[in-house]
Image: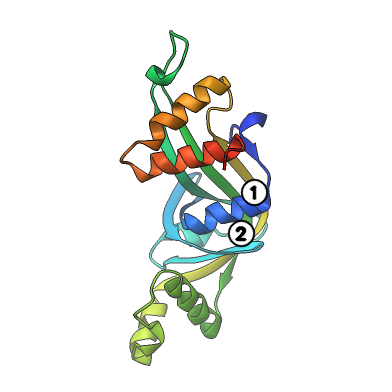
Amino acid sequence: MYLPRHYQVTDQAVLYDLMRRFSFATLVSVHQGVPFATHLPFLVQEGVISSHLARANPQWTDFDPNQELLVIFQGDHSFISPTWYEKHPSVPTWNYMTVHAYGKPRIVEEPQAVKQLLHELVVQHEQEWDMMQLPPDYLQGMMQGIVAFEIAITRLEGKFKLSQNRSLADQKRVIQALSVSENPSDRAVAAQMRKNLGED
């Protein structure tokens, strides 16, 4: 992605934290010569991300262990009004946090490994329902309708575009405006901006 240096984040702990908090991500590959995307929940572990897609989805048929895929994790984001800036004329923009994970895929076929992956994906979000209590024949039938896979991460790109190109006064005015927003994503962007300025 386009990644000016002042927006670049290389701290792996920060990148993995965003990936885990926003684990519903977009898998991008090339299918029959054109871009193809699927929106999926991911299990994020150090060095590897895992998920599954419908067997009827043709994207998995192009998985090549020698070809990188892209998974986009989109974090908090906010519209930035030019009215918040000190100097005019100015134009609106968008502040956001995102991580691009690149890696090579491997289809997971061993039934016990598939079941374990599904279980870990469920418990990541579900505290009351236990997948393992499903009737075995029903669970097996459901598993036959999916393709589980893992992606060994080859590189991570982090971009936190948070008004770093503006003056300190402008950044503080943006923080002030976002902090009183009713939108939790706006407030989260403000919190990260404060952290960038060493105020948190």
- Location of the N terminus (image quadrant): top right
Q: Residues within 10 Å of mark 1 (few under 14, many from 20)?
A: some
At mark 1, the secondary structure is strand
Residue at 65%, 63% in the rendered image: 46
Disc 1 residue type? Leu
User: Please, which residue is most extreme toward the left here?
Assistant: 182
Image: 64 above or below 91: below
In the picture, measured across the screen, residue 83 lies left or right of residue 61, that is left
What is the tally of numbered marks visible in this picture? 2
Disc 2 residue type? Asp
Residue 87 visible in the picture:
yes
Point out residue 191 in the picture as x, y percentages from the top left corner.
49, 41
Residue at 38%, 91% in the rendered image: 136
In front here: 160 or 67? Answer: 160
Point out residue 114 in the picture as x, y percentages from the top left corner.
51, 78
| Label 2 sits on residue | 64
In front here: 76 or 146? Answer: 76
| Label 1 sits on residue | 156
Q: Residues within 10 Å of mark 2 (few under 14, many from 20)?
A: few
Q: Nearer the viewer, mark 1 or mark 2?
A: 1
